[in-house]
Image (cartoon, rainbow, N blue to C red):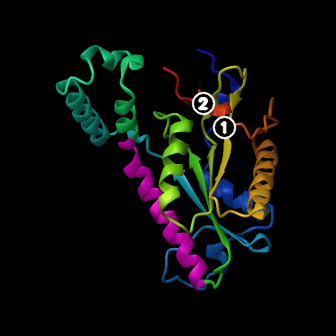
């Protein structure tokens, strides 16, 4: 089987790739400006001129394929079937699943994402305190490498719901892909994503910075992996409603 070129390219190391990118555009690794062994868990990057602290997180586990998730999923199915809220056949026909079941299924993914957000929030919070950057804005750069069992719209929706009520040191997050591509119906290309989401308290200056960061990231990747065949910039959230990950390993 002959795979397309974009599926044959080796995966990029997320952390070192971002280190190079940030330094390329004038940002700093916070670990480089801290003396010795810091007494706190610091965030990853400082954009001093823009008053932004960024924490890089990578989704390396496909939570929907773990044994613990499968056990919880089976219990959820058994509960709905035994309560008469869902037929056994609906397991194989998702269109027949009740809406409340779909919501409960999504909630099973929430704890794993919450742990990531909680740690990132603490790292940003402590970095702001220890380096006297109280007025800096905090953002998460969330790279999805291997969490492909849940569509991007659901992942971003869960994160938005969590951040609406918790983790106030995070003013924005960017959901992006680096080592897997995404299929979007109506688009003939394999796509990489850069999806920024902002809290209500995020100023326009932060929005402008993150949008510029996305453009710079695109330019950086083109130098690294080759020119893209297609680029789409849109504020329409419906653009990713039916987006699905394309596995790097086709079977």
Report crowding for label 2: few under 14, some 14 to 19, many 20 or more residues within 10 A (C-alpha).
few
Instruction: Tell me if residue 125 is in the magenta stretch.
Output: yes
Report crowding for label 1: few under 14, some 14 to 19, many 20 or more residues within 10 A (C-alpha).
few
- Quote the CA–CA distance across marks 2 and 1: 7 Å
What residue lies at 39% left-to-right and 29% top-to-bottom? 99
Q: Which residue is mark 1?
A: 237
What residue lies at 38% left-to-right and 43% top-to-bottom? 107
Q: Residue 218 falls in which quadrant of the image? A: top right
Task: Please state, as top left, top right, bottom left or bottom right, where the N terminus lies in the image.
Answer: top right
> x, y (%) of residue 143?
59, 48
Most extreme residue toward the left is 82
Q: Which residue is mark 2?
A: 241
Mark 2 and mark 1 residues within 8 Å of each other at the beta carbon: yes
> x, y (%) of residue 84?
21, 23
Against 71, is 19 above or below? below
> x, y (%) of residue 134?
63, 80
């Amino acid at each position: 089987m002959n795979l397309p070129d974009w599926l044959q390219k080796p995966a990029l190391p997320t952390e070192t790739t971002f280190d190079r990118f940030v330094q390329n555009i004038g940002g700093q690794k916070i670990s480089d400006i801290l003396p010795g062994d810091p007494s706190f868990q610091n965030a990853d990057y400082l954009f001093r001129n823009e008053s932004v602290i960024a924490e890089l997180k990578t989704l390396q586990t496909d939570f929907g394929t773990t044994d613990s998730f499968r056990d919880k999923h089976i219990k959820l199915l058994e509960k709905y079937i035994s309560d008469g809220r869902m037929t056994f056949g609906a397991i194989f026909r998702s269109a027949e699943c009740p809406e409340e079941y779909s919501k409960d299924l999504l909630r099973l993914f929430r704890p794993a994402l919450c742990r990531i957000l909680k740690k990132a929030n603490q790292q940003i919070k402590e970095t702001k305190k220890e380096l006297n950057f109280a007025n800096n804005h905090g953002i998460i750069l969330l790279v999805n490498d291997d969490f492909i069992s849940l569509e991007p719209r659901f992942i971003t929706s869960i994160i938005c719901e969590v951040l609406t009520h918790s983790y106030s040191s995070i003013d924005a997050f960017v959901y992006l892909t680096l080592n897997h591509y995404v299929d979007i119906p109506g688009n003939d290309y394999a796509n990489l994503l850069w999806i920024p989401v902002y809290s209500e308290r995020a100023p326009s200056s932060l929005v402008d910075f993150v949008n510029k960061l996305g453009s710079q990231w695109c330019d950086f990747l083109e130098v690294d992996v080759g020119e893209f065949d297609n680029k789409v910039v849109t504020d329409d959230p419906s653009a990713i409603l039916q987006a699905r990950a394309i596995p790097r390993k086709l079977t």
